[in-house]
Amino acid sequence: MTNFQAGNKRWKRHRNNSELKSEINITPLVDVMLVLLIVFMIAAPLLSVGVPVNLPKTEAKSLLSQKDPLTITIDSTGKIFIQDEEVLSEQLAAKLNAIIDNGYEEKIYIRGDRSTEYGKILKVMARINTAGFENIGLVTDPINQ
């Protein structure tokens, strides 16, 4: 056997061992999917309304809404929030009028803490009504059975 033929056989043998395989390696895909699952499991609870209040419990059924509702929250200390932004009681009507000017005509939901005085919640409802909103709802937690 000549030197050329021996080298040619070695080349063929080496080339056959290094051919591309047509198998799909799914390990990186599974790793990425598990990381995304963990990220979404951690992030999902953080997407709720940001002002924590202890809502009263009732047997009322939940209402369905097509749009994200405008939520006004009154915490246990009497502070008033529109969504997550704190506003003074005197500024509430002006802020709501600005929202009306931007075309919001849906229901307003009031979230009042269980320990908040009923009179404070009624004052906020009166200010909302004087701002031109007539469709006002109170948010409660369901009673666990």
Image (spheres, rainbow, N blue to C red):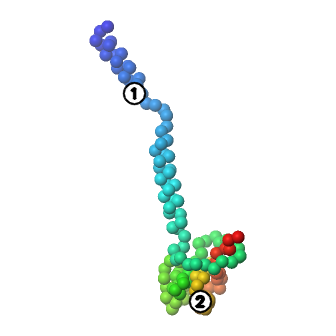
Q: Which residue is mark 1?
A: 18
Say which residue appears at 50% left-offset and 56% top-offset. Answer: 38
Single out the residue that lies furthest toward the top.
1
Q: How many C-alpha atoms fall within 10 Å of the one at disc 1: few (<14), some, or many (≥20)? A: few
Answer left or right for 78 relative to 65: left
- Identify the mark at residue 117; answer none if there is no mark: 2
Does 117 appear above or below 107? below
| Quadrant of the frame with the N terminus | top left
Single out the residue that lies furthest toward the left.
3
State whether residue 99 appears in this view. no
State whether residue 82 appears in this view. yes
CA distance for labels 2 and 1: 78 Å
Does dot 2 land on a helix, a strand or a loop?
Answer: loop
The residue type indicated by label 2 comes to Glu
Label 1 near label 2: C-beta < 8 Å? Answer: no
Residue 100 x %, y %: 57, 82
Residue 124 x %, y %: 58, 88
Q: How many C-alpha atoms fall within 10 Å of the one at disc 2: few (<14), some, or many (≥20)? A: some
Say which residue appears at 47% left-offset and 49% top-offset. Answer: 32
Which is more foreground, mark 2 or mark 1? 2
Say which residue appears at 50% left-offset and 46% top-offset. Answer: 30
Say which residue appears at 71% left-offset and 73% top-offset. Answer: 61
Q: Nearer the viewer, residue 132 or 72?
A: 72
The residue type indicated by label 1 comes to Ser
